[in-house]
C-alpha cells in the first residue's frame, strides 16, 4: 500500500448524485406514560439536524478532505433551507434542485435514554420528470469532477440513473453506485457497485458457499455490464470481485455500536482513495478500515483522516509505516469537530524527547474536553529557545510520536520569528474552549490566554510530574 498517496486526498474531485435527506433528532427524557394512549411522553430538551442520505455520503467525503459536490432534489420548504445551510457549513458545493410540488425528504427521530422511541418519515416519491431536472444539471456540472458517485435510496431522484451513468461515462468519469434496485442492469456501465449482502441476494446472488458467492457475483456484474462489485458482508467483512480477481477483507470492528450509515462511509472512502490515486485493492482495504471505525460510533457517523491514521497505524504496525494528516488540513478538521459540538482543548510545547511526564500531562489535558490539539514548536524555535544542540528529534518525528498517543487528536507546528516563538497566533485561529499549560505559570503569563477568556473559554494550569523532564533525560544519557 502506497501511504504517500494519502497526502493526495484533497485532489479527489467527486460529484455525489442521489436522494438527499434531512435527518432531524429530538432528544429528551421519558419518565411517564401518556394518559391519552399507552405511549411514553418525551420531554424534548435538545434537537439537532443532520445531512442524511446522499448528503451524508457527501459529508463523509468532505470529512476526508475530498473536494465534493452534491446534486439532489429538495422541496421549496424550511427543511430544504436547513439542509442547504448544513451543507454550506460542511464545505460541500451543493447543487440542489428545488421542486415546488413535493417536500424535502425528512426523517424525524425521537430519542430518549439513547433509544429511538419513534421515527416519522415525511416524503413523497420523486417522478421521472423530477429526475430529468437532475440529469439536466448533471450535464452542466460534470466537467468539474473526475468521479461520479450515485447514492440510490429508492426515493425517485435516480429514476433516470441509466441515462445519468451513460452521460458520466461518455464524459470519461469513473462511476460508483450504492444500489437499491435488485435489477442491476439499471446501473450498466458503472465501474463499481457496493451492495450489501441483503441487496446482493435480492439481485440473485447466492451465498450458500464462497465459491457460489464469487461465481454468482461475477455472473451478475457480467450480465449487467458492470466492471466490479464491492460486496459488504457485515461481520464477514467485504469482498472486491471482478471477472479477473477477488480480494477478501476481514471485518475490522468486532464490537458494533450502530451500523447506520456504514455503507455511506464505505463508498465515500472508496471514492476518495481512488481519487487520491490508489489502486482498487488498496482503496477497498482502507474503506474496510473506515467502516470499522464508523460502526463503533452511534448514528450515521463520519471518519476523519486522524482516525484513519490511528487505525492504519495499528493495521500496519508490523510494516513500520505511518500516515500523518498534513498540517494544513488540520484546521478544517477542528472546525468540523466544533460543528459537532465537541469541546476543543489546546496545549503546546517542544516535546523533544517524550517521557512519562509528557504522557501524563497530555492525558490530563485531554480529560478537560473531547479533542486535544497540541501546538508543537518547530525546530528553529526550539533552537532559539533551548540552544544550538536542540532539538534532539526533528519536527516530523516529534509530531509522529505525539500523534500516536491516544490522548492527542491533532498536532500543529508553530514558532516563526514573527510569532515570537509563542502559539498566540495559532490559538487565535483555533479559538479552543480550554487552554491548558503546564508549569508554574499564572494565567496572565500564558500566551493566548486573553483571547480564550475573551471568547468565553477556560484557562487551566497543570502540574508537571516531579523528576520528569527532557533536560534530565539528556543529562542521564550524557553521563
Image (tube, helix red, strand yellow):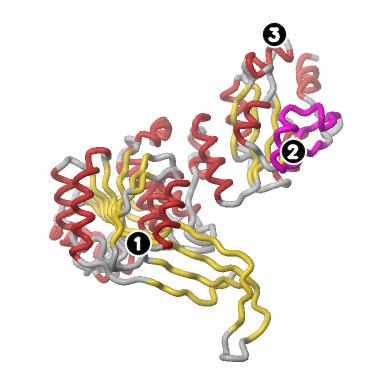
Q: Alpha-carbon distance for marks 2 and 1?
A: 42 Å
x and y percentages locating residue 450 in the rendered image: 74, 32
Mark 1 / mark 3, whichever is N-terminal: 1
Mark 2 / mark 1, whichever is N-terminal: 1
Q: Is residue 111 above or below residue 314?
A: below
- Res. 310 visible in picture: no
Q: Secondary structure at mark 3?
A: loop
Q: Is residue 255 above or below residue 144?
A: below
The residue indicated by pointer 2 is 453
Judge left or right: residue 71 versus residue 262: left
Mark 2 vs mark 3: in front = 2
Q: Quadrant of the N terminus?
A: top left
Q: Alpha-carbon distance for marks 1 and 3?
A: 65 Å
Residue at position x 65%, y 73% from top? 29
Answer whether residue 164 is magenta in the image. no
Q: Secondary structure at mark 2?
A: helix
Residue 183 tag number: none
x and y percentages locating residue 408 in the rendered image: 64, 39
Q: Secondary structure at mark 1?
A: loop
- Res. 24 visible in picture: yes
The residue indicated by pointer 3 is 388
Give the residues drawn in magenta, as a range: 437-462
Residue at position x 55%, y 48% from top? 339
Residue 76 tag number: 1
x and y percentages locating residue 466 in the rendered image: 86, 32
Amino acid at each position: 500500500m502506497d501511504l504517500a498517496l494519502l497526502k493526495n486526498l484533497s485532489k479527489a474531485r467527486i460529484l455525489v448524485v442521489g436522494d438527499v435527506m434531512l435527518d432531524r433528532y429530538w432528544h429528551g427524557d421519558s419518565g411517564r406514560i401518556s394518559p391519552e394512549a399507552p405511549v411514553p411522553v418525551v420531554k424534548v430538551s435538545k434537537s439537532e439536524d443532520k445531512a442524511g442520505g446522499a448528503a451524508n455520503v457527501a459529508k463523509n467525503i468532505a470529512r476526508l478532505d475530498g473536494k465534493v459536490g452534491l446534486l439532489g432534489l429538495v422541496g421549496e420548504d424550511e427543511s430544504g433551507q436547513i439542509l442547504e445551510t448544513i451543507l454550506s457549513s460542511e464545505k460541500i458545493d451543493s447543487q440542489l434542485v428545488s421542486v415546488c410540488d413535493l417536500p424535502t425528504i425528512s426523517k424525524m427521530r425521537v430519542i430518549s435514554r439513547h433509544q429511538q422511541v419513534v421515527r416519522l418519515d415525511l416524503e413523497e416519491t420523486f417522478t421521472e420528470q423530477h429526475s430529468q431536472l437532475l440529469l439536466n444539471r448533471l450535464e452542466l456540472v460534470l466537467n468539474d469532477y473526475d468521479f461520479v458517485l450515485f447514492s440510490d435510496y429508492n426515493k425517485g431522484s435516480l429514476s433516470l440513473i441509466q441515462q445519468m451513468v451513460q452521460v458520466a461515462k461518455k464524459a470519461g468519469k469513473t462511476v460508483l453506485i450504492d444500489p437499491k434496485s435488485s435489477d442491476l442492469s439499471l446501473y450498466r456501465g458503472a465501474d463499481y457497485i457496493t451492495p450489501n449482502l441483503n441487496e446482493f441476494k435480492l439481485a440473485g446472488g447466492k451465498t450458500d458457499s464462497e465459491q457460489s458467492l464469487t461465481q454468482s457475483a461475477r455472473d451478475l456484474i457480467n450480465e449487467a455490464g458492470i466492471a466490479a462489485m464491492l460486496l459488504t458482508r457485515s461481520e464477514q467483512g467485504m469482498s472486491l470481485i471482478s471477472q479477473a480477481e477477488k480480494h477478501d477483507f476481514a471485518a475490522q470492528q468486532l464490537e458494533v455500536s450502530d451500523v447506520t450509515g456504514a455503507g455511506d462511509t464505505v463508498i465515500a472512502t472508496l471514492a476518495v482513495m481512488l481519487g487520491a490515486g490508489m489502486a482498487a485493492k488498496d482503496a477497498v482495504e482502507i474503506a474496510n478500515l473506515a467502516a470499522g471505525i464508523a460502526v463503533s460510533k452511534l448514528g450515521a457517523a463520519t471518519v476523519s483522516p486522524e482516525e484513519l491514521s490511528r487505525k492504519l497505524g495499528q493495521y500496519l504496525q508490523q510494516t513500520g509505516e505511518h500516515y500523518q494528516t498534513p498540517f494544513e488540513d488540520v484546521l478544517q478538521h477542528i472546525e468540523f469537530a466544533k460543528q459537532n459540538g465537541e469541546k476543543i482543548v489546546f496545549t503546546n510545547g517542544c516535546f523533544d524527547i517524550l517521557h512519562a511526564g509528557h504522557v501524563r500531562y497530555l492525558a490530563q489535558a485531554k480529560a478537560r474536553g473531547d479533542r486535544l490539539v497540541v501546538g508543537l514548536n518547530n525546530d528553529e524555535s526550539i533552537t532559539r529557545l533551548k540552544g544550538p544542540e536542540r532539538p534532539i528529534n526533528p519536527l516530523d518525528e516529534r509530531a509522529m510520536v505525539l500523534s500516536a498517543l491516544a490522548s492527542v487528536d491533532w498536532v500543529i507546528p508553530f514558532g516563526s520569528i514573527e510569532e515570537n516563538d509563542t502559539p498566540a497566533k495559532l490559538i487565535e485561529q483555533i479559538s479552543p474552549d480550554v487552554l491548558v499549560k503546564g508549569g508554574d505559570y499564572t494565567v496572565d503569563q500564558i500566551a493566548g490566554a486573553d483571547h480564550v477568556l475573551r471568547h468565553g473559554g477556560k484557562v487551566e494550569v497543570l502540574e508537571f510530574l516531579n523528576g520528569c523532564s527532557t533536560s534530565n533525560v539528556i543529562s542521564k544519557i550524557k553521563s
